[in-house]
Amino acid sequence: MKRFVRAFARVRGEFSERLYILGFIEFMVNYKQRVKALFDGADFDHALVSSSESLRYFSGFAGIGGAYLFLRSDGTSRMFVTELEAPDAKEASFDELVVIPKNKKFQEEVFKAVAGEIGRGPLGIEDSYVTLSAYEEMKQYVGNWVGVSKRISSLRMIKDEDEIVLIKQAIKISEESFLDILKEIKPGVTENHVAAELEKAMKERGAEGVAFPTIVASGYRAANPHAVSSDKRIRDGDVVVVDFGSRYRGYDSDLTRTLFVGDVGEKMRSAFEAVYETQQVCFHSLRIGSSLSEVAKLAITNLAKYGLDIYYTHSLGHGVGLEIHESPYLSVTSGDLLNEGNVFTIEPGVYIEGLGGIRIEDDFLAAKEGVTRLSSLPVRF
């Protein structure tokens, strides 16, 4: 078996032995464990989920809008899909598949079937996801429900070993792809071209897609933290901020690097060093149980030493997993504490209007032995 796995890994370079084994064995076990965990200490025995993230988390199948997964407290599940979704859904992990024919109203058939099983008992629904129209239709069949979005978010905040492996692979794809396209970041090249080349490289290395639209912002545009890549051409003397990430089997990575094209001036060079120092100070301050609002305040304090806190306009970081922004959050208003199994970013930045911006972002893991940086991409180029 090991010999076969090694041969497969050589042929398909994007897979390690562990990734291959996880894909066919361990994931099938963990889905049921995740379903059971949803009901631990809960006052409901059934739940219905339909967001692509929850579908993927509890079954391995994300769907594209025509799927519901009915979960029971004993760990079993029933997948409802349209005929269009059925072929891909069959590869996922659940106990029963129900295909709703195209001559039937999909949501109505799902709600009727669920109501017939739960009786008067409460049904857990994704209250932060369900649309008003779906809720109005559901009320005709289910009169007793409870919101489970926060409960699901709390589960997903603690990554298991399988999830960490996939996130690491997403990071690896992103980093290698970035190094592949570094040569494209030069005077005369448009931001859109760099973004397109990077996204293409990630797909060619095995990503199912990007975690978010790639940001390439140069010169004065780098002062916008959420700039959209444009047809602006990179010029000599520009600071270039590249914010990027790949999605691998549903799991995201999120990285940012700031590059100098020629001489960007002393102010931006000094700002770069201050931002990097701030990231390192925050990273080394973290322990299991740390208040994430306090570490976010530490970033402001450290930048203030250089008079740069007034140019720092966003939070310090966020969780990464099935969504690019999820719990826990590293902000001054966050109530989250750092827990073992958290995967998150630390991404301080400064943005000086008319001049440019600096951001350095890496992905980190809180483990029993401490906080480690999962990304290994150099900071200076």
Image: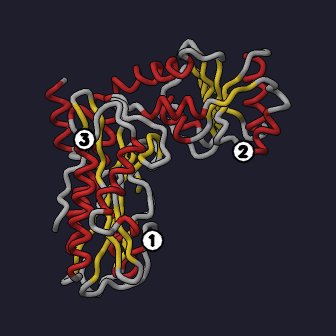
Q: Is residue 126 left or right of residue 113?
A: left
Residue 32: where, in percent of width, then height? 47, 19
Amino acid found under the numbered disc labelled 3: Phe
Which mark lies nearer to you, 1 or 3? 1
Crowd rating for badge 2 (residues with CA inside 10 Å; few <14, some 14–19, many 20+): few
Lower sequence index among marks 1 and 3: 3
Label 2 element class: loop
Figure quadrant of the C terminus: bottom left
Q: Is residue 157 left or right of residue 47?
A: left
Q: Quadrant location of residue 216?
A: bottom left
Q: Residue at x 35, y 40 (%)?
A: 343
Badge 2 is on which residue?
Answer: 131
Crowd rating for badge 1 (residues with CA inside 10 Å; few <14, some 14–19, many 20+): some
In this view of the protein, which residue sits in the foreground, 95 or 360? 360
Badge 1 is on which residue?
Answer: 227
Label 3 element class: loop
Amino acid found under the numbered disc labelled 2: Thr
Which mark lies nearer to you, 1 or 2? 1
- In the drawing, what numbered circle is on residue 15? 3
In this view of the protein, which residue sits in the foreground, 84 or 278? 278
Q: Residue at x 43, y 67 (%)?
A: 225
Residue 374: where, in percent of width, then height? 24, 44
Amino acid found under the numbered disc labelled 1: Ala
Q: Residue at x 23, y 60 (%)?
A: 276
The answer to whether residue 233 is visible is yes
Lower sequence index among marks 1 and 2: 2
Task: Report, in whole angstroms, how far the alpha carbon at label 1 lies from the one at label 2.
Answer: 29 Å
Q: Is residue 163 left or right of residue 177?
A: right
Compared with 128, 98 (above or below) is above
